[in-house]
Amino acid sequence: MSAERMFKSAPSDPDPWMAADTPDDIRQFALESLRWQAQEIIDEILCGKEPGEELARARLRRCVARNPGRPERALLEQLMTNRDRTGI
């Protein structure tokens, strides 16, 4: 199953990994923290110089472009795509 099809069937809750009764300030902190961590991972991958990893970096750039301002979604999409390609 492709990542695109999986995301279309995802619940409409923007943060399904958090309980619905979580206070707003905690939800906001958790989301900002998750986004910061995802962006750090993306930045680290994209600054790589290994020629053999260029295809993965290009795929990640496309994921980032499809998910502006949502690095956690971009990283998840990239990981799901890699999982589908490797048969994990």
Image (cartoon, rainbow, N blue to C red):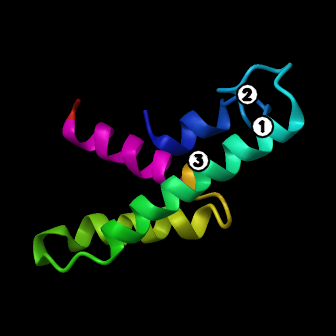
Q: In the image, 63: left or right of 21?
A: left
Label 3: how many residues lie within 10 Å, few (<14), some (14-19) or many (20+)?
some
Query: Where does label 2 land, which residue?
Result: 11
Q: In the image, 6: left or right of 40?
A: right
Query: Where does label 1 land, which residue?
Result: 27
Question: Which x, y percent locates residue 41?
Answer: 40, 59
Instruction: Report the span colored magenta.
Output: 73-86
Secondary element under disc 2, as helix, strand or loop, is loop
User: What is the three-letter code of the residue carrying label 2?
Assistant: Pro
The residue under the point 43% across, 32% down is 1
In the depicted view, which residue is nearer to us: 29 or 78? 29
Query: Where does label 3 land, which residue?
Result: 34
Please report whichever mark, 2 or 3, sits nearer to the chain's N-terminal start: 2
Q: CA distance from mark 2 to mark 1?
A: 17 Å
In the depicted view, which residue is nearer to us: 67 or 48? 48
Q: In the image, 83: left or right of 5?
A: left
